[in-house]
Image (spheres, rainbow, N blue to C red):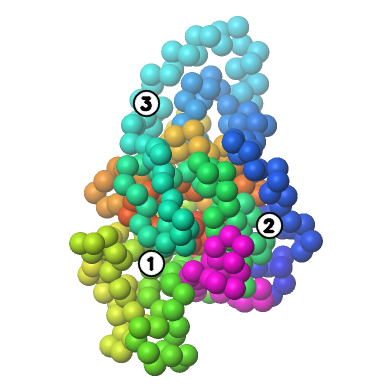
Amino acid sequence: MNQNQEDDSSDDVIQFEDNEIIDFQNIESTTPKVCQPLKQELKITNEFKNFPQLLIVSQQESQPIQQKTNQTKKSPQTTSNNQKNDSPELQKFKDNNYFILQNLQIDSCIEQFLIQPAPKGGMIQCRLYRASPKYTLFLEQFNNIILNAWKKSFQIKGSYKIFPKGKKEQYLGKIKGDFMGQRYIIYDNGKTRKKSKDVNQLRKELGVIYYQPYEKKLRSIQAFIPQLTSNEQLFEFKNQTPYSSIVDSLDNVIELLNRKPQWIPSYKAFGLNFYGRIFKSSVKNFILTQRGSEIPILLFGKNDDREFVLDFSYPLTPVQAFCIALSSMDHKFGCK
């Protein structure tokens, strides 16, 4: 499979040449880049101007909406449209469930931070940059790159290896998908049973993600990650005999579900509250919550063709969150 095929997503992916690499010197600042022109594209009417959290996930009829925009600009009654801000259509998107983790502390061993559950208290904010086959995770609070991923070329199934910054020979985990792009399994850096007979060296499963299509190319996402033990360690699902797999047993796991976008009849579009973090609509945008809860555990979305936002919180590890985001960006034959 050539490079044009390996990352050909169904909605809005742009391919890059092998020698086109992101210049990370442009993002080593206190404020990562923000795509200002894309912000303007989302301001369809005055209602959206006053709801910066609202993002259109998928819209059916863009031309009528554009016509409505032009009419709004020309109408002398533009100011009266602000009264629509209290409409139930837009009010239903408001909530106060997003909290930023303050004063994040990382010990000298960055590798331990990457494979341990995130600290409690709020979301860790990151940016994900794509220059396929390379993907990079940038930690906003520390203005630093923490993880890289490389997608294996010439493979029908999506397969990525995860590395700490500057340590390509020391990978922390991998994620493998099926042919249809509907199931992905996250592993640590252990070995398979074919490569080692030592039980202590066998790889562990860190999560499973399922995708199913529904309603106008939208995706239903269901993820399972190991439950945490009393000492805040991941429950071990090892590649041994008898085989202990998250896929086969739902015991000792945490279930995460994506928050379903809601239809906005007057705009003929699906909307979802991304708390002002996402600036471009895409079917890849999603929020994961624990079953029975409205508190976001992971937020992922697109800002432009190379830049994505990835925010996550306890009980996810940075490696798990990164892998879940990569699974969303992978090509999905089964979700068209």
Residue 29 at x, y = what percent? 63, 38
| Highlighted magenta segment, given as a residue range | 153-178
Q: Residue under circle 1?
A: 207
Nearer the N terminus, badge 1 or badge 3?
A: 3
Residue 302 at x, y = what percent? 57, 45
Q: How far apart are marks 3 and 2 (CA)?
A: 38 Å
Q: Which part of the image, by quadrant, shows the N terminus? A: bottom right
The amino acid marked with disc number 2 is Ala
Q: With 177 as the anchor, is 167 left or right in this view?
A: right
- Residue 105 lies, with reference to residue 327, above or below; the image says above
Q: Which of 194 and 24 is in front in this view?
A: 24
The secondary structure type at the circle numbered 2 is: strand
Asked if the magenta segment contains residue 177, the reply would be yes
Q: With 122 as the anchor, is 43 left or right in this view?
A: right
Asked where in the image residue 44 lies, by quadrant, the reply is top right
Q: Residue 91 carries which label?
A: 3
Q: With 30 as the anchor, is 324 left or right in this view?
A: left
Q: Residue 131 carries which label?
A: 2
Nearer the N terminus, badge 2 or badge 1?
A: 2
Q: With 74 as the anchor, is 312 left or right in this view?
A: left
